[in-house]
Amino acid sequence: MNLYAGKILFVDLTKNTITSEPIKEEWLKDYIGCWGLGLRYFYDLVDPEVDPLSPENAVVVMTGPLGGTNTPLSARFALISKSPQTGTVFESNTGGAFAPELKFAGYDGIIITGKASKLSYIKIDDNKVSIEDASDMAGDGIFNTEIKLKEAIESHEAKTLSIGPAGENCVPYACIGTETYRQMGRGGGGALFGSKNLKGIVCRGTGSIKVSDMKSFLSLIENYKNTSVLHEDNLWAKTDGTPMLMDVTCEMGIHPTRNFTYGINEDVEKINSETMKKFKIGDRACATCLFACGKYTHVNGSEMEGPEYETLVLGGSNCGINDLETIIIFNRLCDDLGLDTISCGNVIGLAMDLAEKGRKDFNLKFGEVSEYLKVITEIAQLSTERGKILSEGSRQMAEKYNSHDLTTEVKGMEFPAYDPRGSYGMGINYAMSERGACHMRAFTAFEEEVFDIEKMAQAVVGGQNFNTAKWSTGLCDVWANSTLEILADIMSNGLGEEIKTEDLEIAGERIWNLTRLFNLKAGLTADDDSLPRKMTQAIQKGPYDGNVFSDEDFNKAKAMFYEMRGWDENGIPSKEKLAELGLDQI
């Protein structure tokens, strides 16, 4: 079939069985791929009340229809499951080249159930798939695990997914690594692998993906590459990568500093994009990417791809760390041990704040380097009492030390690096995300009139629908000026059948509502769509010094969001909305 490999791989780790089934073609138009299609499979497989770390939970890894083609920036793929961090359904995605490799092996996705009797890995060598012993990888970091997985399949060109000690120890914000410096970072995917005794997946594929008319498809892609992708709106990814946001968010006054106390970092020039350029030694791209936004840096022997913006802020500014070499070490440790840098930077910043305010002394202080770096390994390995406490996350720490006034999390997931007190749309987006505080669901920081509640609620709804559809195709957000019209045109050409813009738009809304249905059945209520108490405390320094996001304004925004979504005052989709989206029979 065109664009899709046509098969889904099913791996039951408890029964030690491997099967494959034809992809459900009747779902493709409504759910597309990646996030949407993975969610549709997951919804039928798993009881929403399941314990995320139990064998009964499933992990779905799904590619998109554009993966494996030469469509620029189309190599992303998604993991869908129930999160051990938030108790919600969640999607986490990343790039690299695993998605094309999996499709070249003949599979659009992998659905993993059960729990292996010992530490194992999944080996995919085209149509030869097996569950193998990973005992010799126990305790290894992701970097070394990737090497061993490639040696096991006898190919350095193979692609891998793997976890480090944090995942093996089921730290709720453990991540999954691929190609050394790319992560499925948010939501605890690493803990899900660990709970299943799954150390990783290695894949080698030698096939290809078909399109309806290759000559026509190549011509279309070349046109969009020249007219849309290589547009000045996107070239920041090639020249600077995401660190260019360091100065931008400081100027905007939404740059989290010292546990979200300040809106600016007065020493940002020490860790901004211009400083990184002084130590850059190369660029790295995902498959089919024209930009290579990953920037290799080297400072005094410390080297890695990155750090990215979120890590520079949450592991840097938020912890009072303004030294690039130190943040590189922080980033490498997190990537190798398998920790989400956003959550890790948040919990360390919170621990520093607790100590500063005299509530709990973790021997962690803003700007102090040695203990800041030391505690990362303690968290991943659960090797000290301090590490165990920080491994539980911000919400649990707040409950333990009666400090909900200091935390920045939604549904148990820590904030990304944009302060809502200077950008109401980002706050609405965090609160209404299905997986907890997430900047990727609808990025509204650059919208005009950022304190207009109605406009921001509308921007969040529109952004959620658009991004859900976009990411379900496998496209990267770096193609910032992409449109549903462009995606529909590429999809139609590749499939050889018409996909309308409105088909994609409705698919995005349908997928978003299906996540809502799952979460409601999992026990979430409107009360979970909230912002932490800290947002009603004044931000300090910068252009929005003294600003808050009041409960009154947030509740107005929440009511407007629900109404725009076609949900009632309790956040429950109406029967009419479900019927409109074809979800009334699910």
Image (spheres, rainbow, N blue to C red):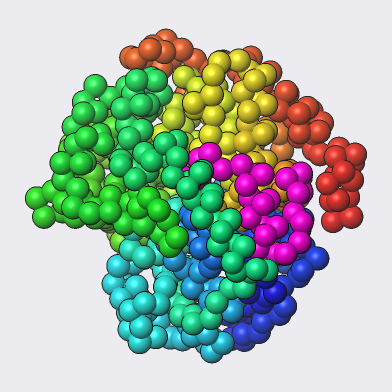
Query: Where does the image place residue 372, in percent across and percent down from the top left?
Result: 23, 43
Q: Is residue 226 above or below residue 204?
A: above
Q: Is residue 95 above or below residue 545?
A: below
In the displayed structure image, the side of residue 502 where residue 99 appears, left or right: left
Query: Where does the image place residue 408, in percent across and percent down from the top left?
Result: 46, 32
- Single out the residue that lies furthest toward the left: 300
Q: Please indicate, yes or no, whether residue 167 appears anywhere in the rendered image.
A: no
Q: Nearer the viewer, residue 365 or 489?
A: 489
Q: Which residues are magenta?
A: 476-503
Q: Nearer the viewer, residue 396 or 109?
A: 109
- Quarter of the image holding residue 463? top right
Is 138 included in the stretch rendered in magenta? Answer: no
Q: Residue at x 45, y 53 (%)?
A: 185
Q: Is residue 17 above or below residue 301?
A: below
In the displayed structure image, the side of residue 326 where residue 84 appears, left or right: right
- Quarter of the image holding residue 557? top right
Q: Residue at x 67, y 82 (%)?
A: 20
